[in-house]
Image (cartoon, rainbow, N blue to C red):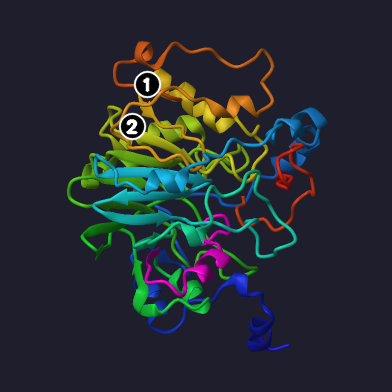
């Protein structure tokens, strides 16, 4: 069978390979060498062989039980009503789950890594499935000025969501090469801002800059490392925010902070980590360290933990990313935001403690850690505490009463 016929049979969700002028830009990129995009620091993207030895322990009934909520996740019920009034500070963030965040900044609305699909998979019938619904339907969200994509893995670049935006005026800021997927799904190339690391674009008074990350790419059986991955900085001149996308820890966070900070808020990946892929995802402690690096060595601004709570993509217990971030923040006196999915918040405002995940998670042996009130922990602390393109789930049902949301078995 010829290559063209194979391409024709490839599922649409796999996207498209860069060609023509786009491919020429890739080949000329300083971040591309030896036929692939390169990480700022060497990174292994294939899970280590030790994972096979650990599988029996990870499949024990007690271990599996901790990898999913035991009751419905408390999704914020009044998201649209809360978004109706503009943010008083000029900056508001709404975590929709996983890495999807709506940022209202400079009078504009920026939507990071929007995933409204039920599964992060190329197939509608298999793959990691949501453990909670999206807080609001995409069609009711209203105007979105810019969609920002960090990389092309299924839990960050969702074909059904992109296709739902084809008929809108939304423009897209994406890493180099990712535009090929969007064009394949119907997005007009005139609406694409496709950037290499350290390149910027202007949209409606906002400056968006693609910054380095330590990760990898790929949606199909071939073409790995042919599209770039990135973290992002967005500023309106008065406020500055940072979205990490997916990344392993690396020294470049300090340089990003030096060039583009200080940040009013950072959105940092702290979930789906594992000792079997330590270079491409951060642990909660590493995520907090990245936030401190971005802050110039002293915690400042609010850190919003992302990439957790919605899809089960790793062997760790479901609540561990949030608990680990809370512990790291209390240790360092950092300000974190732990909103329920769909709850808008302004990073500059004080918030009451809401460790909501504890109400629906299996408690760890010995119970939940106890912490002093946020004000007692530190004067500046906040009042509150892969392979991503997996395509097969375990068919495990979610908690009773949690609609039909299930958690997929980690690979």
Q: Which stretch appears magenta?
A: 151-174
Asked if residue 329 is positioned above or below residue 40 in the image, the reply reads above
Asked if residue 27 is positioned above or below residue 395 in the image, the reply reads below
Q: Name the residue carrying label 1.
A: 332
- Quadrant of the rendering where the N terminus is positioned: bottom right
In the rendered image, which quarter is residue 207 located in?
bottom left
In the rendered image, which quarter is residue 30 located in?
bottom left
- Residue 134 falls left or right of residue 92: right
- Residue 47 falls left or right of residue 217: right
Asked whether the beta carbons under mark 2 and mark 1 sit within 8 Å of each other, the answer is yes
Q: Residues within 10 Å of mark 1 (few under 14, many from 20)?
A: some
In percent of width and height, residue 408 lies at 72, 47
In percent of width and height, residue 357 lies at 58, 29
Q: Residues within 10 Å of mark 2 (few under 14, many from 20)?
A: many
- What residue is shown at x 63% (from left), y 34% (from top)? 318
Q: Which mark is residue 311?
A: none
In three-dimensional space, the C-alpha distance between marks 2 and 1, rounded to whole angstroms, equals 9 Å
In percent of width and height, residue 53 lies at 76, 38
Q: Name the residue carrying label 2.
A: 292
Is 319 or 97 nearer to us in this picture?
97
Per the image, is 168 magenta? yes
């Amino acid at each position: 069978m010829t290559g063209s016929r194979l391409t024709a049979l490839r599922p649409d969700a796999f996207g498209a390979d860069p060609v023509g002028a786009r491919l020429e830009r890739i080949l000329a990129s300083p971040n591309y060498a030896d036929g692939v995009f390169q990480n700022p620091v060497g990174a292994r993207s294939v899970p280590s062989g030790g994972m096979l030895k650990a599988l029996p322990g990870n499949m024990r009934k007690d271990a599996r039980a901790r990898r999913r909520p035991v009751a419905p996740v408390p999704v914020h019920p009044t998201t649209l009503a809360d978004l109706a009034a503009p943010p008083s500070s000029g900056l508001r963030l709404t975590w929709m789950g996983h890495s999807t965040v709506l940022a209202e900044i400079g009078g504009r609305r920026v939507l990071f890594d929007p995933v409204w699909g039920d599964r992060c998979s190329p197939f509608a019938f298999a793959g990691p499935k949501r453990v909670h619904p999206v807080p609001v339907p995409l069609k009711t969200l209203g105007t979105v000025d810019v969609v920002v994509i960090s990389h092309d893995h299924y839990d960050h670049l969702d074909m059904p969501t992109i296709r739902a935006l084809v008929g809108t005026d939304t423009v897209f800021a994406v890493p180099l090469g990712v535009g090929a997927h969007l064009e394949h799904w119907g997005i007009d190339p005139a609406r694409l801002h496709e950037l290499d690391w350290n390149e910027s674009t202007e949209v409606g008074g906002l400056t968006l800059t693609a910054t380095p990350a330590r990760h990898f790419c790929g949606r199909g059986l071939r073409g790995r490392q042919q599209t770039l991955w990135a973290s992002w900085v967005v500023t309106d001149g008065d406020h500055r925010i940072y979205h990490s996308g997916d990344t392993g820890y690396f020294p470049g966070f300090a340089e990003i902070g030096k060039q583009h900070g200080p940040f009013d808020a950072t959105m940092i990946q702290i979930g789906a980590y594992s000792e079997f892929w330590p270079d491409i995802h951060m642990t909660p402690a590493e995520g907090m360290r990245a936030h401190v690096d971005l802050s110039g060595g002293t915690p400042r601004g609010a850190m919003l933990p992302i990439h957790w709570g919605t899809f089960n993509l790793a062997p760790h217990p479901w609540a561990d990313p949030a608990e680990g971030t809370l512990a790291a923040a209390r240790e360092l006196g950092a300000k974190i935001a732990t909103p329920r999915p769909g709850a808008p918040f302004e990073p500059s405002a004080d918030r009451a403690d809401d460790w909501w995940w504890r109400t629906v998670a299996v408690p760890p042996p010995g119970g939940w850690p106890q912490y002093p009130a946020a004000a007692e922990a530190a004067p500046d602390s906040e009042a509150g505490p892969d392979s991503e393109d997996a395509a097969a789930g375990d068919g495990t049902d979610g908690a009773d009463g949690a609609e039909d949301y299930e958690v997929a078995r980690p690979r």
